[in-house]
């Protein structure tokens, strides 16, 4: 079929299998160009492995330290005349490349919040790898079915205590406008967001893996978070999502205790603001990112998810002396370049003057837009999008 982008808000309804495969290959080539991650992980489970930081973590582990990887993801398979989602095509491409390069790579497809998928992943680890030495937790979902209570929980992106008014951008049209987001009306909205995006599911994963006996000696687990600048605090750090991230951090001591027999360690990594399917959904954030990209690119310190994942492994989780550098709260900070005083000062100045009329000049809104479409395999200059491609792409490890 001929596959062109069709969008609805911050979602692209179609994906291009060749474009997504090229994106995976570019990330692989970046890691190969950077050299090996000494003392890096060898047997890795990535929960939420098909897009964004999860996908890049899988690639960094496989191609940076030759790791065997198992990826857990929940994707939409293709059917005749209908494309898969990006996660499906990314996973298929990664497995194909890994196989060609002699790397073990298998995937578990399904709801990562469910006990069935957790147990399936544990069984696959035991059968093929024996144990794992790194577990990456990189889930971003709007809903969660609690496998214990059977209750469905939905997260909300809202401020707490008072309405929040600020600028935002329609990145498709390039128009800046003001937006007011009403605060949560009841504690239940906060509690539900914590249920979906907090540390409870991360803990359930480690419990299942520990019970199955597949946690290797000195195993590490890392979950991803974000803090950001003060201008996004009301909708992020101090909002409902921020409460969930606090809960994520509070889970770390519990996980350390769960893994004490194998001398394991848990970490939360605070990452850089980037164009992902999740970040595109948060009001205010796309405008901030488009300004941030402009400044960081000018300073030569811009990173995408693969650069972040590689640096996280190389300079934080697997340092030469074995020490993992953390901040005063025990968090890994790979957002350090984003949060530099000079970067934030310049972003703040641009924020104050940003309008629809000057946006193209003072921001990298075009770069934001390109990266958004690249997530779905579009805007690749090497592809003729008027040429038919086969939308049916299988994932090798899922074939019966």
Image: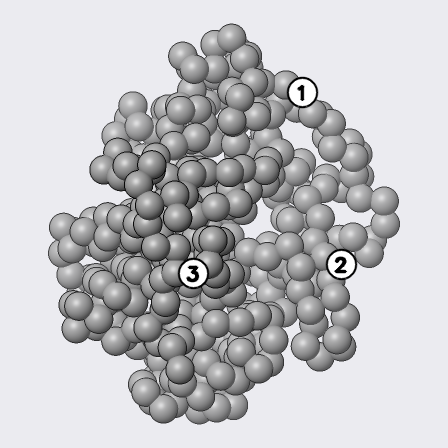
Give the foreground label among 3 and 2: 3
Position of residue 58 measured from the top left corner of the image (x, y, whole percent): 33, 63
- Residue at screen point 52% across, 90% down: 211
Q: Tag 1 or tag 2, which sits nearer the N-term? A: 1
- Name above or below for residue 232 compared with residue 196: above
The residue pinned by badge 2 equals 191
Q: From mark 1 to mark 3, how far is it between C-alphas?
A: 36 Å
Q: Which dot marks residue 88?
A: 3
For numbered disc 2, what is the local secondary structure?
helix
Position of residue 59 measured from the top left corner of the image (x, y, whole percent): 29, 60
**Residue 267 figure quarter:** bottom left
Counting labels gives 3
In the displayed structure, does residue 6 sit left or right of residue 340? right
In the displayed structure, does residue 355 sit left or right of residue 93? right
Q: Residues within 10 Å of mark 1 (few under 14, many from 20)?
A: few
- Name above or below for residue 228 compared with residue 127: above
- Residue at screen point 44% across, 75% down: 108
The residue pinned by badge 1 equals 178
């Amino acid at each position: 079929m001929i596959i062109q982008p069709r969008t609805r808000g911050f979602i692209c309804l179609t994906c291009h299998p060749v474009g997504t495969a090229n994106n995976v290959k570019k990330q692989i080539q970046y890691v190969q160009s950077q050299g090996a991650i000494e003392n890096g992980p060898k047997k890795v489970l990535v929960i939420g492995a098909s897009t964004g930081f999860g996908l890049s973590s899988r690639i960094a582990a496989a191609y940076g330290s030759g790791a065997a990887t198992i990826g857990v993801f929940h994707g939409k398979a293709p059917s005749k005349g209908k494309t898969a989602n990006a996660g499906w095509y990314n996973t298929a491409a990664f497995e194909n490349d890994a196989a060609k390069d002699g790397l073990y790579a298998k995937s578990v497809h399904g709801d990562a919040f469910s006990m069935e998928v957790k147990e399936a992943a544990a069984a696959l680890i035991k059968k093929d790898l024996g144990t794992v030495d790194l577990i990456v937790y990189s889930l971003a979902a709007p809903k969660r079915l609690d496998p214990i209570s059977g209750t469905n929980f939905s997260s909300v992106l809202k401020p707490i205590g008072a309405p929040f008014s600020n600028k935002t951008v329609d990145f498709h049209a390039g128009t800046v406008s003001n937006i007011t987001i009403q605060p949560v009306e009841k504690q239940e909205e906060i509690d539900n967001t914590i249920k979906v995006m907090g540390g409870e599911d991360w803990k359930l994963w480690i419990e299942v893996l520990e019970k199955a006996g597949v946690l290797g000696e000195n195993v590490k687990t890392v979950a991803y978070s974000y803090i950001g600048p003060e201008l996004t605090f009301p909708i992020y750090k101090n909002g409902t999502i921020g409460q969930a991230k606090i809960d994520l951090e509070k889970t770390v001591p519990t996980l350390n205790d769960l893994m004490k027999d194998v001398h394991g360690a848990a970490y939360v990594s605070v990452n850089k603001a980037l164009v992902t399917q999740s970040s595109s959904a948060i009001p205010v954030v796309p405008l901030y990112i488009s300004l941030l990209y402009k400044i960081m690119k000018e300073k030569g310190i811009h990173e995408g998810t693969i650069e972040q994942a590689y640096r996280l492994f190389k300079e934080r989780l697997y340092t030469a002396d074995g020490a993992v550098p953390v901040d005063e709260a025990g968090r890994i900070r790979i957002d350090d370049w984003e949060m530099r005083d000079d970067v934030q000062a310049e972003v703040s100045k641009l924020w104050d003057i940003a309008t629809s009329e000057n946006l193209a000049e003072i921001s990298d809104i075009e770069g934001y837009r390109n990266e958004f479409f690249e997530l779905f395999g579009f805007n690749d200059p090497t592809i003729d999008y008027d040429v038919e491609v086969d939308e049916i792409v299988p994932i090798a490890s899922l074939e019966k």
